[in-house]
Amino acid sequence: MAENPALATPTDLNRNDTKSVADALNSALADCFTLYLKTKNFHWHVSGPHFRDYHLLLDDQAAQILGVTDAIAERVRKTGNTTLRSIGDIARRQTISDNDAEFVAPGDMLAELRDDNLKLVESFRAVKEAAEEAKDNATSGIVDEWTDQAEERAWFLFEASRKG
């Protein structure tokens, strides 16, 4: 993320400190895009007796995940840094694994997405830590909402997958 004068953004935050915040945000952003696509994949390919419920749940969750991506990228820019530029950039930074399986059982889908959302929570906690170290109050504050949303998605996926 070399600084380009045409992309310079005014900020009173220390550039070295915000670099670590931007790195954490970009990692979380890569995970959001990965989780979004996986959630949509499972939404498109879910089958079985709970099809409608799971199909709608996954569509709602995918929309929520996609909705946070712009806020994350804009936060990176507000700190004077640059964000993701390509699918390749996402692939280099993601910590959540893709799932290219031809078939995944619905229960396995829910469990995998639950775990992935909890992994995203870990990414958001890394953002929070970097933001607090950089005295970036805005990022520190906004990441709490993203964390809460990911925890809620994990909870819903857990509850939807319970037997009985």
Image (cartoon, rainbow, N blue to C red):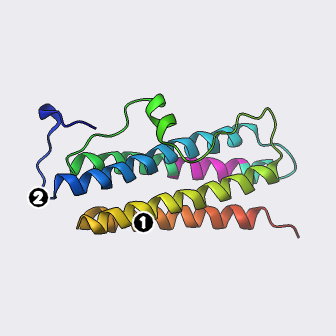
Image marks 1 and 2: residues in contact by CB distance under 8 Å: no
Number of numbered discs on residues: 2
The residue at 82%/36% (across/down) is: 103
Q: Say which quadrant the N terminus sits in.
A: top left
The residue at 74%/57% (across/down) is: 111
Q: Is residue 163 left or right of residue 83?
A: right
The mark nearer the N terminus, 1 or 2, is 2
Residue 35 locus on image (x, y percent) = 57, 46
Give the farthest residue toward the front. Answer: 16
Residue that numbered label 2 is attached to: 12
Q: Is residue 40 magenta?
A: no
Q: Check disc 2 and report its element: helix, strand or loop.
A: loop
Cα separation, mark 1 vs mark 2, equals: 24 Å
Query: Quick check: 12 above or below 10?
Result: below
Label number found at residue 112: none
Residue type pointed to by label 2: Asp
Residue type pointed to by label 1: Glu
Q: Is residue 119 left or right of residue 49?
A: left
Of residues 121 and 64, which is closer to you in this image?
121
Q: Say which quadrant the C terminus sits in.
A: bottom right
The residue at 71%/47% (across/down) is: 55
Residue 65 locus on image (x, y percent) = 51, 50
Q: Check disc 1 and report its element: helix, strand or loop.
A: helix
The residue at 48%/45% (across/down) is: 66
Residue that numbered label 1 is attached to: 145
Residue 20 locus on image (x, y percent) = 31, 54
Magenta region: 55-64
Residue 29 locus on image (x, y percent) = 44, 47
Mark 1 or 2, closer to the camera: 2
Query: Quick check: 93 above or below 75?
Result: above
Mark 1 crowd level (few <14, some 14–19, many ≥20, 10 Å Cα): few
Please name the predominant secondary structure of the magenta segment in the image: helix
